[in-house]
Amino acid sequence: MEYTFGTIEKKWKKYWAEQGAYRVNNHSDKPKFYILDMFPYPSGAGLHVGHPLGYIASDIYARYKRQKGFNVLHPMGFDAFGLPAEQYALETGQHPAVTTEKNIARYREQLDNIGFCYDWEREVRTSDPQYYKWTQWIFLQLFHSWYDRKELKARPIKDLITLFEKEGNGHYPCPEDNAFCFDAKGWKSMSEKEKRDTLMRYRLAYQGYAEVWWCEALGTVLANDEVVNGVSERGGYPVVKKQMRQWFLRITEYAERLLQSLDRLEWSDAMKEMQRNWIGKSNGAEVRFDVIGFNDLHITVFTTRPDTIFGVDFMVLAPEHELVHKITTKQQKEAVESYLNYVKSRSERERISEVKQVTGCFTGAHVVHPFTRKEVPIYISEYVLGSYGTGAIMAVPSGDERDHNFAKHFEIPITNIFGNVYNGEAAYTEKAGKLQNSGFLDGLEINKAGEVAIRAIEDAGIGRAKVNYKMRDAGFSRQRYWGEPFPIVYVNDIPYSIGEDELNAHPSLQKLPVELPLVQDYKPGPEGEGPLANVSEWVNTHAGIRETNTMPGYAGSSWYFLRYMDPHNEHEFAGKEATSYWREVDIYIGGTEHAVGHLLYSRLWTKVLYDLGFISFEEPFKKLVNQGMIQGSSRFVYRIHGTNKFVSAGLKDRYETNKIHVDVSMVNGLELDTTAFKNWRPEYADATFELEDGKYICGAEVEKMSKSKYNVVSPDDIVAQFGADTFRMYEMFLGPIEVSKPWEQKGIEGVHRFLKKLWRLYFDEQQGWIVTEEPCTEAELRIIHKTIKKIGDDIERFSFNTAVSQFMICVNELSALNCHKRTVLEALAVIITPFAPHLAEELWHRFGHESSVLDAPFPGYEEKYVVDNSKKYPVAVNGKTRVEMEFPLDMEQALIEKEVLADTTIQKWLEGKEPKKFIYVKGKMINVVI
RNA sequence: GCGGGUGUGGUGAAAUUGGUAGACACGCUAGACUUAGGAUCUAGUGCUGCGAGGCUUGGGGGUUCGAGUCCCUCCACCCGCACCA
């Protein structure tokens, strides 16, 4: 009997579907385990062989945990809102809902093909109104909350109103503006509009005017992490800064907590470090410098080096700093204006690429140094960012490289506060040594002087210690159609949320979801508004005008892991009972590309829901596993310029050629199937070839797998050719899960061969089932028990490649022993279930079982079969292995020593010398030192 | 520039705690069976040498009886951030 994977896999897929074998219950006596994959965006291209890598790993782990007696939640869904569907709609007029539906169906088919154990009854789709109803609901929780800096948590906005009514905002300063103060009377005297504006400055989801990244080509604003190297991450289009009224999430209030609780997570250092860098905490001080000639103007700077305050030689303001126009002198006005024009004219891309260039302009104004009373000139320059710190710095050229370059460029005299270690050529940026020329800091160690300086600054009443974060509040508005609508209606230009009293007169404005209306065209609306602005019958309600922006892609994905716990709940985003049972995701698997986007926003939403008492845990993903990317291996042909002649790769340098991608399915290894190539496209029908050794050899390069590069390999093809079980094991066998590598088909034969060999332990070509009830030998038991142990250990530590190779070793050894015994082979079928479930189920039923192998407990191993009682020791002389000798593990060292020294080979290497030392490490090795 | 990571045969890789480097595969070589094989099986396969042996984990140095593993230093590549005061 042959291993007919096609029929076997079909049979058991059907059986599992009929049995509902993957259904998961929220009530169980078993301990819970939640293992989650990052859900995919269902693109039109379908899955390629790279996508399932992480899914296979999590599937194996989930199945293993189930066999180990856990109630395992392992769901899947779709991140279904997004730009590509909308852009496709713009081009073809097809509604995104239609194309999305189609793509999801295709994804589902491909995923099922590989045999994943998802409970599809828990599927979520972010674009489903029954799902985004709750995305909107959570947004409203953020809208109706503020961050209490005393209790360090989010609280309902109505608490804040109560506080304002009682005492004003004296104890609860405005996060955007410390100077904004009012008392209880002040609050009460405010108009409705003023009160709402004031609350807006506290809300966790708030509206504000801010400079945002505007992408003209995409017709939308983008979040900071969606802008890469000065262009849009998606599409690579130029972006510019623009003032717009936008929704934001006040993530900056959570900066410290997001930073602190990273320590408790089992994520890779790289991932944690990326988040730390993104949050970008720095300790320092804020210092105020008075501007000479103005009684009421001063420049506040943020510095991490208050210890260098005596080295200040000039001040620099960001070009957009509000004081620039006020302090610029008449003489310098023209120069400053022309510099500001120059700055405006530069695109973000130019700024980034010409970072080293020194530019700037003197304002003509000065501040007075608070300690030395010296006059210090004020410059403006691009190198100071308006968006960080206070948008102004105190420049210390002797201690900062950039300040040093600036001082040299503008020939500003440099004060040396470091003595000999500063050589006048380059700034001294180390924090070792003693300060000089520094007033009351003279002689202090640099790393100790900071505290002293801050105390002096505070005593003088000109500043205070200050912590700064790089992270900005997250932009939450998009001018798109295919996203969640905001549950917001403007009455007299005041935004109210669906369900608020002010809208209650109108029943249609009381309930969520606010559904996306159907539209005819997807073009942007007027003045940078989204396509929804064109749908006037939707925009205009009885009470007022709807918000026409939609939420960004990360909205729906920030909480989807919660919905899986209770996906059909119509009354809550997820019931407390369900969330208290499943709690946080135990293991989350996905790529590193979401380090500062999705993973950060999910953490924020989880913390807010926790603060407001909706869930009982504060972090969404306890352990994070990052799978590597499988890249494509592209193939190229070389067309000689102006001809239809193609030259083999080895000969291409003799001609002027164009490199053209060819579909990898037409290439075997590197050899092109020239007939297939001619049939590929009409333009190649009469192609001619210059061959080497009778073959056309293609060029090869590793690139991202993509349709346009013709290097996509579909899992369906592999499954059709070798079966899902082979495909699953092969992807795991490729190497460690976290390593990226190009797709390589060659090795798959080896894994397939292994499964056939395993099959032959159970079946003979002629006789069929050949498993016997004979008792096992010690050797056979040793093999299977060692395998049971190693497979369990390897799965636990996500080392699937070594697990596969252990299966190979096991099968090789059992084959060599001609072992067809039930005890051993039944155990083998059970432990291979997570890797090759279809094959395992077939074998399991052949053994006569009625139930599914999915619930067969993962067997334990017996220590006595795993531990050897003797060891073949490598015996080394001076660290070099010379001979192998076998001794029982419990043999006394003295006896071993005697035998080793008596050995003829060892005698030879001793050359008659007396050993200085005899090293015996039990179970490891023996070393004789002479 | 800063931060994180990786370097092991022709190839993918293994070595979990400092203890026989290269497990397991791919590929290749030879052979068996076969009408045939892209099926299956057997043997070999880091480099070097006839051999005993010598050499070998990016380079150099160190600690150790013993280093792929620890320390120092240099080089190369990958990823992230990037004028963050």
Image (cartoon, coloured by chain):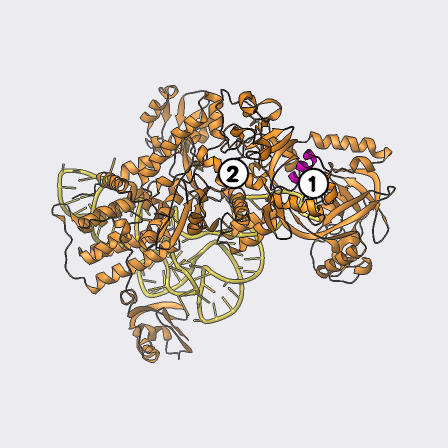
Chain colours: A orange, B yellow
Taking the view exactly as shown, the residue that stands out farthest to the front is A505
Residue for point 76% across, 33% down:
A339
Q: Does residue A422 appear anywhere in the picture? A: no
Q: How crowded is mark 2: few (under 14 residues within 10 Å), some or many (20 or more)?
A: some
Classify mark 2: helix, strand or loop: helix
Q: Amino acid under label 2?
A: Trp
Q: Residue A434 carries which label?
A: none
| Pointer 2 with pointer 1, Cβ within 8 A | no
Report the residue marked by disc 2.
A137
| Same subunit, tags 2 and 1 | yes
Does residue A196 belong to the magenta stretch? yes
- 2 or 1: tag closer to the N-terminus: 2
Q: Does residue A401 appear anywhere in the picture? A: yes
Closer to us: A256 or A7: A256
Q: Amino acid under label 1?
A: Leu
Q: Is residue B13 above or below residue A362?
A: below
Q: What stretch is highlighted in magenta?
A: A191-206
Q: The residue marked by circle 1 belongs to what chain?
A: A
Q: In this view, does A709 lie above or below B34?
A: above
Q: Which mark is residue A385?
A: 1
Q: Where is residue A878 in the image (x, y as percent from the top left)?
A: 41, 71
Q: In this view, does A916 lie above or below A262?
A: below
Tell me how far mark 2 sits from mark 1, CA to CA: 36 Å
Q: Where is residue A466 in the image (x, y as percent from the top left)?
A: 70, 52
Closer to us: A404 or A124: A124
Q: The residue marked by circle 2 belongs to what chain?
A: A
Q: Which of marks 2 and 1 is in front?
A: 2
